[in-house]
Amino acid sequence: MKCTNCGFEFSEGIFCPECGLKNSDGNKKENSNNIEPQKSLESNAAIEFHSDGNITGKSNGFATASLIMGIISILTVGILFIPEVLGIIFAFVSKKGGSMIGKAKAGLICSIVSIVILIVLMMI
């Protein structure tokens, strides 16, 4: 089958593995609004298209590590200080030049909240 969007040849599935566009029964459609087709997905995109038609969530290890460090920092009320710093570092490393995904944002927020809680507790 040939993708109607980018012209990539593929044999299985209904989604083009190159651009991710859903192709119908081989009917060719013209791009009437002159928008440049998307050639590839970002490396940190939240979804991933497979050639067999399946769509799965894409995981980022640094984002997950940031979330875990954020949860640990909340549970320890910021006393350890290492999980807070690692949570913030992992959140920014997971961006890879793009935008942060939800896990990284949650880890960053938890780490910052833990530091704020520690500062408030030290003032009391």
Image: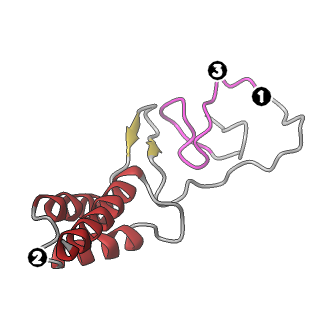
Q: Amino acid under label 2?
A: Leu
Foreground of the two, 26 or 75: 75
The residues colored magenta run 9-27
User: What label does residue 20 carry, if any?
Assistant: none
Residue beneath disc 3: 25
**53 on left or right of 121:** right
Q: How is the image coloured?
A: secondary structure
What residue is rendered at 35% in x and 60% in y? 109
Give coordinates of residue 60: x percent, y percent.
33, 59
Residues at marks 1 and 3 touching, judged by CB atoms closer than 8 Å? no
Categorize mark 1 by other alpha carbons within 10 Å: few (<14), some (14-19), many (20+): few
Residue 33 inside the magenta-drawn segment? no
In the depicted structure, whether residue 51 falls above or below residue 115 = above
Q: Quadrant of the N terminus?
A: top right
The alpha-carbon separation of the residues under discs 1 and 2 comes to: 60 Å
Q: Comparing marks 3 and 2, which lies closer to the viewer?
A: 2
Of callouts 1 and 2, which one flags the residue occurring earlier in the amino acid sequence? 1
What residue is rendered at 20% in x and 65% in y? 69
Q: Comparing marks 1 and 2, which lies closer to the viewer?
A: 2
Q: Quadrant of residue 16?
A: top right
Q: Quadrant of residue 68?
A: bottom left
Residue beneath disc 1: 28
Give coordinates of residue 65: x percent, y percent.
23, 64
Residue beneath disc 2: 80
In the depicted structure, whether residue 6 falls above or below residue 111 = above
In the depicted structure, whether residue 50 falls above or below residue 80 = above
**88 on left or right of 80:** right
Q: Quadrant of residue 24?
A: top right
Q: Amino acid under label 3?
A: Asp
- SS under mark 1: loop
Give coordinates of residue 53: x percent, y percent.
46, 31
Name the chief secondary structure element in magenta: loop
